[in-house]
Amino acid sequence: MESLKWISRFLDLTPGDENVGGLPRQVPGKCWSRVRPAPVPNPSLRLWSKEMADELGIEIGQDEILGGNQIAKGMDPYAQRYGGHQFGNWAGQLGDGRAITLGEIDTGQGVLELQLKGSGSTPYSRFADGKAVLRSSIREFLCSEAMHHLGIPTTRALSLVTTGEDVVRDIMYDGQPAPEPGAIVCRVAPSFLRFGSFQIHALKGDFDVLRTLVDYTVKHHFPEHCTDSDEGLLEWLKQVADETARMISHWMRVGFVHGVMNTDNMSIHGLTIDYGPYGWLEDFNPDWTPNTTDAGRKRYRFGHQAQIGQWNFARLLEAISPLMKEPDLLYQALESYEESFTQYNNSMWADKLGLGEFTQSDEELIVELVSILQSVETDMTIFFRLLSSIREPQIELLKFAFYEPESIPVEEWNRWLSKWWSRVDGKPDQATMKLVNPKYVLRNWMAQLAIDAAEKEDYSVVNELFELLKKPYDEQPEFENDWFQKRPEWARHRVGCSMLSCSS
Ligand code: AMP
Ligand code: MG
């Protein structure tokens, strides 16, 4: 690690805390606090992303550094300060409560930030311990890499290290705390700046700091834009809108539900970030959310993600508005989010159905499809994958996607399939379909099987899934029997599969 080119632009160019580490507290007017990762008894490298390591130029190993016991020369660890709207309400200062950035690496192709998640408390830990458990770390590692290989913008994972130390968690918040193995994931992104990174300064009235942070962000991460005029800021924000809309349209394509779309979990780069109680649709249910904390209102349910993206983006616009001479111009950025999403969404559906170009009249076909998909329990992933190879418009050929084949509304389906078939003149673009309808995704029960084994020191399942999910669009027939499958009955109501808490 010492041979890498470490830089510390963020620390050099934005205002930071004078104190190092310390107890949880408010850190007004600052963007970060220097901290030290907490030492752990027995760091042991368990998972390693070679693809990520190659990009960074890092050799396998480095357990002591990736476990937080050593700091390599050139690193200058810190925790970022940010705020956020949680479930619709302004929550004030949040910040990296259990993430510690080690530093930024100039790879020659760009700058990437390395961050340990679960490496102990920071001034932003509030009432918690700053640690992470193995189960949530496996979920973060596997899913970030799986998303990357699906072609979905995401933060990445380099490593997972177990710490040799137990962490106590009350997994279902029902008064039954229990020790679990602790772990640390090293994650990687151009930056971990979030909408909430800007909000905190705007909502506290620290407009000079806001200005510094916006100038910094645009100069170093969006160099094609400038911030010295309303127009410049507007163009930058339109790009953020576009990238956010693009990310969410990808989630909708593969059936991913983020689960906690608070504004502190919205990356300024439009990257999927902070893998907590996320989940993947099994049956096509737009009302589904895996997050038990959100079970009542289902604010972050699958079918609501695009609107929430816009709501969150509006909060970012409000945060930037004090820097504008004519804040009303920001309505243009809000509209551009909608335009971007509509475009991405239309072409996403056109690709999923092999339509070629989307035309307005395709809307009816899509609306009808979304409706019949919900009429009986139907596996989303299997349905679209099989649709990508059928040679005739017969529902019989898609039977494997249904939980109860005898309850399929056969006539209704065949009517829709014939309509689709004539729309594409009997020649759906199935090559494209196979590139956007993955065969393998990280179903909740798959991750749970990997976790159950890893908690018994058996990492073979995690590693098998890691390999499988590097090629999610390939047939990989050797894996079909195990992983191209509907949710098994045992997973229907199991904690960690159908429901997940924020406990991690
Ligand atoms: P999340 O819901 O994971 O995005 O977290 C929301 C906020 O809680 C962030 O500021 C996190 O850093 C903080 N947080 C979550 N878990 C912990 C933990 N175990 N220790 C300290 N802070 C935490
Ligand atoms: Mg978060």
Image: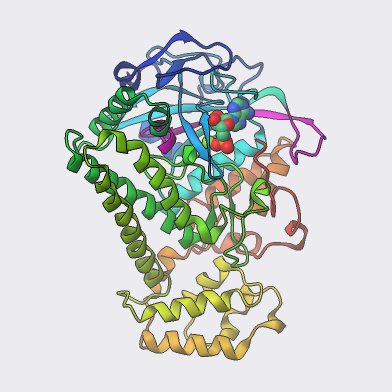
Q: Position of residue 348 (x, y in %)?
A: 39, 66
Q: Where is residue 193 in the image (x, y as percent from the top left)?
A: 40, 33
Q: Which residue lies furthest to the top in this view?
A: 19
Locate residue 326 relative to residue 85 in the image: left or right: left
- Judge whether residue 184 can be spotted in this image: no
Q: Which residue lies furthest to the right in this view?
A: 176
Q: Where is residue 68 in the image (x, y as percent from the top left)?
A: 55, 18
Q: Is residue 183 magenta?
A: yes
The relative height of residue 393 versus residue 213 in the rendered view (above or below) is below
Magenta range = 168-197
Q: Is residue 391 magenta?
A: no
Quadrant in the rendering for residue 208: top left
- Judge whether residue 447 can be spotted in this image: yes
The relative height of residue 285 versus residue 457 in the rendered view (above or below) is below
Quadrant in the rendering for residue 226: top left
The relative height of residue 400 versus residue 200 in the rendered view (above or below) is below
The residue depicted at 50 percent of the width and 64 percent of the height is: 475
The residue depicted at 45 percent of the width and 39 percent of the height is: 156
**In terms of depth relative to the viewer, which is nearer, 338 or 122?**
338
> Considering the image in quadrants, where does the C terminus appear?
top right
Locate residue 434 relative to residue 208 in the image: left or right: right
Locate residue 377 relative to residue 371 in the image: left or right: right
> Considering the image in quadrants, where does the N terminus appear?
top left
The residue depicted at 38 percent of the width and 41 percent of the height is: 316
Q: Position of residue 255 (x, y in %)?
A: 53, 60
**In terms of depth relative to the viewer, which is nearer, 209 or 353?**
209
